Image (spheres, rainbow, N blue to C red):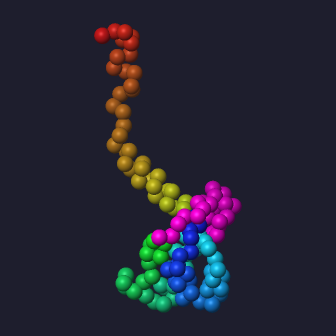
């Protein structure tokens, strides 16, 4: 998913080194998965341990507009799992959502077939 590069995102990217700074100096968009990877790498590289010290991706993306859902800056559709067009993170999110859904409907089973109780009665019968 491509999002708009806001001033907060640009300020963070300037801290990520000269090559990253040059790459995004005039960029108007960035792939969310790439931003998350850069945030994680930055926190690890700077050895930031506590929640207060760490750069938080969710704070960086606040106020940023979604420009495209195709993930143009990240992995291409052919690189996604099974060629599905999803990035690895997108595929994991989809699996988690499906698992949560399956768990939520597990207890919702029909006790008897819909047509079983009054199957001999016609529409006009009372």
Q: Is residue 15 placed above or below 81 in the rendered structure?
A: below
In the displayed image of the protein, which residue is found farthest to the right?
Answer: 78
Left or right: 98 as drawn, with respect to 23? left
Report if residue 88 is visible in the image.
Answer: no
Q: Residue at 51% across / 70% down in the picture?
A: 64
Please identify the quadrant where the C terminus is shown.
Answer: top left
Q: Is residue 70 magenta?
A: yes
Q: Residue at 69% across / 61% down in the picture?
A: 78
Report if residue 10 is visible in the image.
Answer: yes
The answer to which quarter of the image holds residue 115 is: top left
Left or right: 83 as drawn, with respect to 99? right
Q: Residue at 43% across / 88% down in the picture?
A: 48
Query: 58 or 99, which lies in front?
Result: 58
How far from the left and from the top, in percent, is residue 91? 55, 60
Q: Is residue 109 magenta?
A: no
How far from the left and from the top, in percent, is residue 102? 42, 48
Left or right: 36 as drawn, with respect to 76? left
The answer to which quarter of the image holds residue 77 is: bottom right
User: How many badges with numbers are in the image?
Assistant: 0
How far from the left and from the top, in percent, is residue 73? 64, 70
Q: Is residue 122 placed above or below 3 in the rendered structure?
A: above
Query: 117 or 56, which lies in front?
Result: 56
In the displayed image of the protein, which residue is found farthest to the left?
Answer: 126
Q: Is residue 92 placed above or below 114 in the rendered structure?
A: below
How far from the left and from the top, in percent, is residue 14? 57, 87
Q: Which residues are magenta?
A: 63-89
Please identify the quadrant where the N terminus is shown.
Answer: bottom right
Query: 86 or 116, which lies in front?
Result: 86
């Amino acid at each position: 998913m491509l999002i708009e590069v806001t001033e907060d995102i640009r300020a963070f990217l300037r801290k990520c080194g000269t090559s990253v700074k040059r790459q995004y100096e005039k960029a108007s968009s960035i792939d969310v998965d790439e931003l998350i990877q850069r945030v994680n790498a930055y926190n690890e590289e700077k050895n930031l341990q506590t929640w207060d010290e760490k750069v938080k991706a969710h704070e960086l993306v606040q106020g940023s507009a979604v420009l495209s859902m195709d993930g143009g800056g990240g992995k291409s559709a052919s690189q996604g799992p099974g060629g599905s067009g999803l990035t690895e993170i997108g595929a994991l999110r989809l699996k988690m959502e499906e698992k949560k859904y399956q768990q939520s409907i597990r207890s919702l089973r029909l006790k008897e077939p819909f047509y079983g109780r009054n199957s001999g009665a016609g529409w006009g019968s009372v």
